[in-house]
Amino acid sequence: MSNAAVSPQLPTNFQQKDNEVSEQKGIRLTAPEHTAGKAGNGQVLVEARGLQKSFGARKILRNVDFQMNKGDITVIIGKSGSGKSTLLRALAGLTDPDDGEIVVDGQTVFADKQRTKLWDGVRSEVGMVFQTYTLWPHMNVLDNLVLAPRKVRGANASESRERAEAALAEVGMAEHILSRPTQLSGGERQRVAIARALMMKPKLLLCDEITSALDPPVAAEVLDVLRRLKEEDGIAVALVTHDMAFASKAADRVVFFHDGEIAVNATPAAAFNNSDNQDLKKFVDAVRF
């Protein structure tokens, strides 16, 4: 697979331009027709409306509206505890919001404070990759990959292996199919984790800080895998990351969380070059340096 690292350069012009059109000002855009990305096919894949979530007295999501198009890469940034990971977990069905609605591929999967019956039919369309890999150490790579398809879908051994070989090839790990996770580097384990998520043939891949524990060159390789999945397979990717270079180069939309709300939802150029949001400017400056 390619070892080309994502350029570390970030656009340096972070001043508001008076003559920019209003869409490029990076202000919060909540109406569905305004928040759709432009690089995919324009068809909405996932939409969250009015999501709210609290843990005890702490409010994590405050009436969050979020939308992604099919085949887009959306990079989600913000301080720790601002609501980024909670949004991903809600979209993946790992956390139920306290209120709001979630629609995946036209199917309302969360409403009236509970998962609907339609969730079971679309849950395999949503894959998630975690920072900590979550691979079974006593199983080899093949067994880690085929476990879910065989348990959940009842796939047979030959079908599961064929899919595993294809998924590993997509992430450049085909030669490690019989390796144990303990025999792999951190970057290799993360690519295996991505391959495992691909086993269910998702339309949406949710990635939560998957490169934060990796060295920059290795992280660049993992992020390049995500970019190729979007370009070659049309898989939409929602990625929580602090890699501003990847966000500026590869994202179709940049979403900035602040205090449980989406403060900015814009194209990378608008978010990084033309936003008048002071919290975003402070965050980007802190991450860059």
Image (cartoon, rainbow, N blue to C red):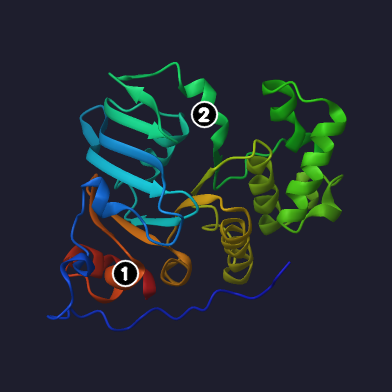
Say whether residue 213 is left or right of residue 83: right
In the picture of the structure, the residue carrying the numbered disc 2 is 122
Q: Picture coordinates of residue 259 (x, y %)?
A: 22, 48
Q: Residue 87 versus residue 100: which sits nearer the camera?
A: 100
Which amino acid type is marked by label 1?
Val
Circle 2 residues within 10 Å: few <14, some 14–19, many ≥20: some
**Outermost top residue:** 117
The residue drawn where x is 49% and y is 52% is 209
N-terminal of the pair, mark 1 or mark 2, is 2
Helix, strand or loop status at disc 1: helix
Which residue is identified by label 1?
A: 284
* Image x and y of residue 163, in percent: 77, 40
Q: Nearer the viewer, residue 164 or 34?
A: 34
Work out whether 119 lies above or below 188.
above
The total of numbered circles placed on residues is 2
Q: Amino acid at mark 2?
A: Val
The quadrant of the picture occupied by the N terminus is bottom right
User: Is residue 138 at least partly visible in the picture?
Assistant: no
Q: Nearer the viewer, mark 1 or mark 2?
A: 2
Q: Position of residue 10 (x, y in %)?
A: 40, 78
The quarter of the displayed image where residue 78 is located: bottom left
| Position above or below: 25 against 107 | below
